Amino acid sequence: FLVALFSLSIVTGAFAAGDSDGGWISLFDGKSLDGWKVSEDHPDSFRVEDGQIVANGARAHLFYEGPVENHDFKNFIFKADVMTTKGSNSGLYIHTKYQKDDWPNYGYECQVNNTQGDPQKTAGIYDTVKVLEAPAKDNEWFEYTIIVKGKTIETQINGKTCAKYDEKDKAEMDHRSRGTDLSSGTFAIQAHDPNSKVFYKNIRVKVLPD
């Protein structure tokens, strides 16, 4: 009984890491896609291997639908460790919501692309604030940080700021005229195409006050 209780405390602690780790809460258990929901168009484009989410296959999106904040985040610091392979494209969506197919109609995409042909590279806020020189390399893990406060977005790679956006400047920006007003929503990971293979791990969030 004591062994079982101890094991349970370890598992429980893994999901509530944040209470004792500066407010950080894990969104991925490293073993399964529990708490995540893949779009219906190509569900086989996501799998878990060696403690990592692998995005590799035809276009699909993996949405966080778990219990943290009832998967509705407003102000936060989001972090994930990411590794791209040569010629790969992916993305991290914020303030989005589940969609069964197609490209997400809501939220902003923070680009993941170090060497694929699209000129918009890693850490850019897609079609909004473009990063044209990749701040990371293929086949190396890098820490991707997204900070949302009020109507602002900031992206960082390995602690270095790469892009900043203030929604009050939207009229002056090159952006998609979609549902891109910052409000609240969940996170999503993009599988872009069968030739792209991108790895994600240590996915976590720190919720900030309104």
Image: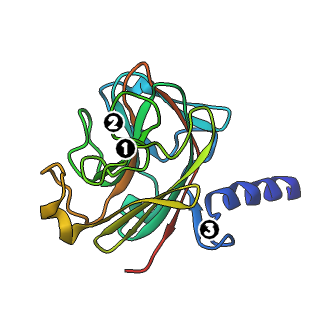
The residue lying at 57 percent from left, 63 percent from top is 25
Query: Residue at the spot x=56%, y=33% of the render?
Result: 138
Q: Mark 1–mark 3 contact, CB under 8 Å?
A: no
According to the picture, the residue beneath numbered tag 1 turns out to be: 132
Amino acid type for the residue under numbered disc 3:
Gly
Q: Is residue 172 visible?
A: yes
Give the alpha-carbon distance from disc 1 to disc 3, as whole Å. Answer: 34 Å
Which mark's residue is nearer the viewer, 1 or 3? 1
* For residue 8, above or below residue 133: below
Three-letter amino acid code at the position of disc 2: Pro
Estimate the x, y position of residue 50 in percent, counting from the top left. 68, 33
Q: Mark 1 is on which residue type?
A: Leu
Residue that carries the numbered disc 2 in the rendered image: 119
Residue 202 spot, x, y in % from top left: 61, 50
Q: Earlier in the sequence, mark 1 or mark 3?
A: 3
Q: Position of residue 149 (x, y in %)?
A: 37, 73
Cα separation between marks 1 and 2? 6 Å
Q: Badge 3 is on which residue? A: 18
Front: mark 3 or 2: 2
Above or below — where is 44 with respect to 135? Answer: above
Quadrant, the C terminus = bottom left
Res. 189 in view: no
Q: Secondary structure at mark 1?
A: loop
Which residue appears at 37% of the width and 44% of the height?
132
Sequence-first tag of 1 and 2: 2
Instruction: Determine the image quadrant of residue 51.
Output: top right
